[in-house]
């Protein structure tokens, strides 16, 4: 996160606000204080000057009156001299100059030694003329450019004592009011220095107060950031029971609740991941645009890709159905679709169902696709159909033959002593064929349902195989095979090899293989029978010199009713179930059976059975 500068923090803002409030308050207080002080000082100065003017007026009045009425003046008194003496000796506060003017505007006296030349001269002064002519006192502030200072000027008219009350002169007093403003300036400077000190101290105090407020907030901010990043350790320090303290307590409680909720969500997520990972169905979830954002491992395996490559892909393109369907159409369809992903190497058929992801408000936020591998189901269904077809065909052929012969017998052939036995033999033969096939089917059904149990016992497999071969030697010497010139070559083990097997079932297997070898061997052909013993198994090999089996059919010959050459196989008899039963029986024993063949050179059937060597002493034999 970008680091904030100090002036952008709440601490700086609080300090700034407090300082600005203090400055504003000091400005208001200072302006009012200085203005009031100035007014009071000026008013006091004016009042003092007025008192001095009145005092000076009372002192000079008799001499002005004598000057105005010279007949009343004693011989030993000179009014001008007396007036000059009075104003020269007058020591009023802040007075810088005094002038006395008679009613004719003639200067009678001046306290300023540099202005003595004006004594006896007419005074051309507007204020003096106004005061004498109108009889009004004039007080005002003036500026003296000579000394570059402000002066307070008071012009006070002097009235005659008789009934006329005529103005007999005026007193002009100039005072130095600049000292008052100097005092105001000094007071202002003192206030400014005090204000500056107050601002500095207030800033420090505001910083301390702000720090006390923002420190808990900073801790809460740090804790909130840690919670957002998934760190729920530690708690915010609670400094008190105020609002910040309650907020800190709530953040600690929120941290605990979020941690608990996160743990529950994480547990649910792990559980969901575990469920998705271990599902036998593939699951794909998309957003509302059809882009994949969730896929489990099974779906990735079904589609022959990886989760990382699938994420972000469009589900319709991934399933190769974007040309036939759109997302809305699949949702409205509300039916599963079957998609064939089979390749030359491996078959793969998937059945896909679609459902929408909908919020509580009804908004569609995505689609869930469930993929189910129905390759085996389709294969089983196809085999079932083929099985039913094969069974129907296999049963129909002997039944049709029997029906034909029975109808012939009903129609009178039974009376023919030569035909009737032959027809009955055919009917019996076909009946036996159907019984064998039904028995084979029942045997396979018991194996499929797990109800076929083996009655195992330790049998000398060499003796058992020899017995089977001896029986086939006798068969080949019978009248039916005497003209075919078949022969059996043996390469068996000279010693007894005891194997834990069900002898009846194993004889059935060997009979099926030997019968096939004889059926498909040419006249005069040789059937080779061999045995090999290794450390942990016995291997039996039966080889014929027949037409062989094409390579592409080798993997299918153990399927039920499968025939390489159907027409020839049916002509030779058999139900088409012998090899299927043989494989099931051998696998029940924990062994294997397979065929190796080269066309027109013959076929070799290999049977392996588990074998554990033992010594006779283990059985207590001597």
Image: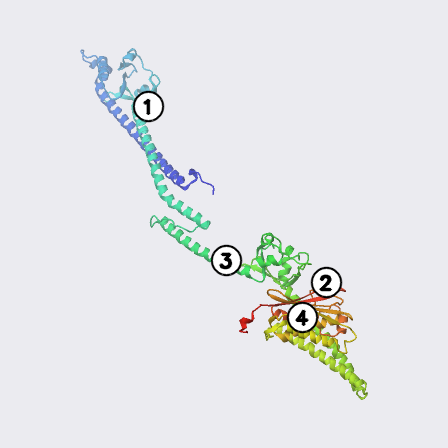
Picture layout, residue 279 above or below residue 74: below
Q: Position of residue 31 (x, y in %)?
A: 34, 32
Q: Element under label 3?
A: helix
Q: Please tell me whether mark 4 or mark 1 is closer to you in this view.
A: 4
Residue 127 falls in image quadrant: top left
Residue at x 65% of width, y 76% of height: 442
Q: Please tell me whether mark 3 or mark 4 is closer to you in this view.
A: 4
Q: Residues within 10 Å of mark 2 (few under 14, many from 20)?
A: few
Q: CB of mark 2 within 8 Å of CB of mark 1?
A: no
Q: CB of mark 3 within 8 Å of CB of mark 2?
A: no
Picture layout, residue 292 above or below residue 67: below
Residue at x 61% of width, y 53% of height: 313
**Counting residues from the N terminus, which is met first, the one under dot 2 or under dot 4?**
2
The Cα atoms of the two marked residues, 4 and 1, are separated by 137 Å
Q: Please tell me whether mark 2 or mark 1 is closer to you in this view.
A: 2
- Residue identified by numbered label 2: 551
Residue 196 falls in image quadrant: top left
Q: How is the image coloured?
A: rainbow
- Residue identified by numbered label 3: 270
Q: CB of mark 2 within 8 Å of CB of mark 4?
A: no
Q: Residues within 10 Å of mark 4 (few under 14, many from 20)?
A: many
Q: Position of residue 90 (x, y in %)?
A: 22, 18
The Cα atoms of the two marked residues, 3 and 2, are separated by 49 Å
Residue at x 32% of width, y 26% of height: 185
- Residue identified by numbered label 4: 580
The Cα atoms of the two marked residues, 2 and 4, are separated by 18 Å
Q: Element under label 1?
A: strand
The numbered disc on residue 141 is 1
Q: Is residue 245 visible?
A: yes
The Cα atoms of the two marked residues, 3 and 4, are separated by 46 Å
Q: Position of residue 386 (x, y in %)?
A: 70, 70
Q: Nearer the viewer, residue 274 or 14?
A: 274
């Amino acid at each position: 996160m970008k680091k904030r500068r100090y002036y952008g923090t709440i601490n700086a803002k609080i300090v700034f606000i407090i300082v600005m409030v203090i400055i504003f308050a000091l400005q208001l207080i200072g302006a009012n204080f200085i203005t009031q002080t100035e007014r009071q000082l000026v008013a006091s100065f004016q009042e003092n000057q007025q008192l001095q003017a009145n005092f000076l007026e009372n002192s000079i009045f008799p001499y002005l009156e004598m000057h105005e009425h010279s007949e009343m003046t004693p011989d030993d008194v000179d009014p001008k001299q007396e007036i000059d003496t009075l104003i020269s000796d007058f020591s009023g506060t802040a007075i810088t100059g005094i002038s006395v003017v008679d009613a004719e505007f003639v200067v009678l006296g001046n306290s300023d030694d540099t202005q003595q030349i004006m004594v006896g001269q007419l005074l051309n002064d507007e204020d003096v003329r106004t005061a004498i002519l109108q009889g009004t006192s004039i007080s005002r502030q003036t500026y003296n450019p000579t000394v570059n200072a402000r002066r307070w000027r008071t012009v006070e008219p002097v009235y005659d004592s008789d009934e006329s009350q005529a103005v007999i002169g005026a007193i002009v007093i100039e005072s130095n009011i600049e000292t008052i403003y100097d005092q105001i300036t000094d007071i202002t400077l003192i206030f400014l220095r005090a204000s500056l000190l107050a601002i500095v101290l207030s800033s420090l105090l505001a910083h301390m107060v702000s720090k006390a407020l923002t420190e808990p907030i900073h801790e809460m901010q740090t804790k909130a950031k840690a919670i957002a990043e998934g760190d729920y350790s530690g708690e915010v320090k609670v400094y008190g029971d105020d609002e910040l303290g309650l907020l800190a307590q709530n953040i600690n409680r929120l941290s605990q609740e979020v941690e608990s909720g996160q743990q529950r969500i994480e547990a649910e997520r792990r559980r969901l991941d575990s469920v998705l990972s271990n599902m036998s169905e593939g699951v794909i979830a998309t957003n509302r645009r059809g882009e994949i954002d969730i896929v489990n491992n099974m779906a990735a395996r079904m589609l022959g890709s990886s989760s990382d490559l699938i994420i972000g892909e469009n589900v319709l393109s991934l399933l190769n159905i974007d040309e036939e369907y759109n997302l809305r159409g699949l949702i409205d369809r509300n039916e599963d679709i079957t998609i064939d992903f089979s390749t030359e190497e491996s078959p793969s058929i998937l059945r896909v169902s679609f459902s929408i992801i909908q919020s509580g408000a009804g908004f569609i936020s995505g689609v869930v696709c469930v993929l189910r591998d129905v390759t085996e189901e389709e294969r089983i269904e196809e085999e079932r159909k083929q099985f039913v077809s094969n069974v129907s065909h296999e049963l129909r052929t002997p039944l049709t033959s029997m029906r034909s012969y029975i109808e012939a017998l009903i129609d009178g052939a039974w009376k023919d002593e030569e035909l009737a036995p032959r027809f009955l033999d055919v009917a019996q033969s076909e009946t036996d064929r159907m019984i064998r096939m039904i028995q084979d089917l029942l045997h396979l059904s018991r194996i499929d349902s797990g109800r076929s149990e083996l009655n195992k016992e330790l049998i000398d497999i060499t003796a058992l195989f020899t017995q089977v071969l001896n029986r086939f030697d006798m068969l080949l010497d019978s009248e039916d095979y005497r003209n075919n010139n078949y022969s059996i070559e043996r390469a068996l083990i000279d010693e007894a090899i005891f194997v834990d097997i069900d002898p009846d079932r194993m004889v059935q297997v060997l009979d099926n293989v030997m019968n096939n070898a004889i059926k498909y061997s040419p006249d005069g052909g040789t059937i080779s029978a061999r045995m090999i013993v290794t450390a942990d198994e016995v291997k039996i090999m039966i080889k014929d010199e027949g037409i062989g089996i094409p390579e592409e059919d080798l993997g299918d010959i153990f399927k039920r009713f499968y025939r390489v050459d159907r027409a020839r196989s049916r002509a030779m008899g058999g139900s088409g179930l012998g090899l299927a039963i043989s494989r099931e029986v051998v696998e029940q024993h924990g062994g294997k059976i397979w065929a190796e063949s080269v066309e027109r050179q013959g076929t070799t059937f290999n049977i392996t059975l588990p074998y554990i060597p033992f010594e006779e002493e283990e059985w207590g034999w001597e």
